[in-house]
Amino acid sequence: MSLNRSAEPISEDAALANGYLADTSRSDPRVSPAVLTTELRKEFRTTTALGGLSMTVGRGEVFGFLGPNGAGKTTAVKLLLGLVRPSGGEAMVLGAPAGDRETRRRIGYLPELFRFQSWLTAFEVLMLHCRLIQLPRVRALSAIDEVLETVGLAERRGDKVGTFSKGMQQRLGLAVALVGDPDLVILDEPTSALDPVGRHDVRGIIRRVRDRGATVFLNTHLLEEAEHVCDRVCVIDRGRSIATGALVDLLGRSSSVRLKVAGLSDDDLAVVAKFGDVARDGEWLTVARIQADEIPALVAAVVSAGGRIGAVIPEQQTLEERFLELLGKS
Ligand SMILES: Nc1ncnc2c1ncn2[C@@H]1O[C@H](COP(=O)(O)OP(=O)(O)O)[C@@H](O)[C@H]1O
Ligand SMILES: [Mg+2]
């Protein structure tokens, strides 16, 4: 069942707006974006889960879909997979309408909430999945070995899922999403059941998936997760995208720094002023809108002007502050 009920192709304007030039980029499976949505909407009775989402995810990106609980992340992913039907708008995945069966085999998916059959072994769960994606048996066997190794479950391949801890089940879920080297890996809150070591492992796994050229679409409400692995993020709140871009751009490159300085007269402050906006409060100087990599030069300038430095405290806006600021505006 295709999600793309409209026969109309996505307009060139929409493709342009999303940063993709011509129609050909969508129809050629090698260069079409991994994900392209245009005004994608989903309403559940009185709830608008997704209120018109337009976004593009390029091939080979680790794309973070970041937002608080209830923002619409899981709904968006289910729309991309064809598991729920949109109320409006369009979604293309790997160059085909969302939900396309053939394409579905090239997408790995870790659902937010899942439960494997407790009586199956890890190997059997994975073999079942390999059959679903129609991987020939010999390839399936090596793919399963490889993926169990990747997620750290090689030793438990013959054990029943019912004996697995929550974290191990999460790792198995990840293995299911990765087996057979899918072109697009969609992970919905992949580290929710994992301890810090597990979270660290997952980041490494995500980077490896990216290194082999696949695209990762990562749903997360965890800022640090996005911060560590994502090339770009879309921040979503109440069904609407409120910011998209590289994290460095969302955060801004400039920061401010506070210096505790003795022995500098107001006249000497001229050497500091060229680095940013200076404010003085007793022996504390604040230099706002300074480029972070200019801080050493600032310190050197203060010292050569005769200042004695007691402290240097850089204050970059954290992702958390920026996130709350964005949510506050939305
Ligand atoms: N099947 C459903 N029926 C009714 N409301 C739903 C359903 N699925 C999701 N919602 C609602 O849509 C909104 C977005 O939910 P969801 O996509 O799960 O958010 P997230 O994954 O970002 O936490 C929430 O208000 C949620 O209650
Ligand atoms: Mg969710």
Image (tube, rainbow, N blue to C red):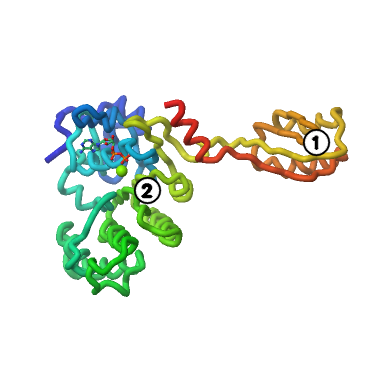
Q: Is residue 137 above or below residue 249?
A: below
Name the amino acid type tagged 1.
Answer: Glu
| Residue type highlighted by circle 2 | Gly
Location of residue 79 in the rendering, given as x and y in whole percent from the top left corner: 23, 39
Q: In which quarter of the image is ligand 1?
A: top left
Please indicate, yes or no, whether residue 5 appears anywhere in the rendered image: yes
Residue, disc 2: 60
Residue visible at 28% across and 38% down?
Answer: 76
Determine which residue is flagged by label 1. 283
Neighbourhood count class around disc 2 (C-alpha, 10 Å): few under 14, some 14–19, many 20 upward: some
On-image quarter of the C terminus: top left
The one nearer the camera, 44 or 101, is 44
Q: Earlier in the sequence, mark 2 or mark 1?
A: 2
Q: Is residue 95 visible?
A: no
Camera-side mark, 2 or 1: 1
Q: Quadrant of residue 18?
A: top left
As drawn, is 212 to the left or to the right of 83? right
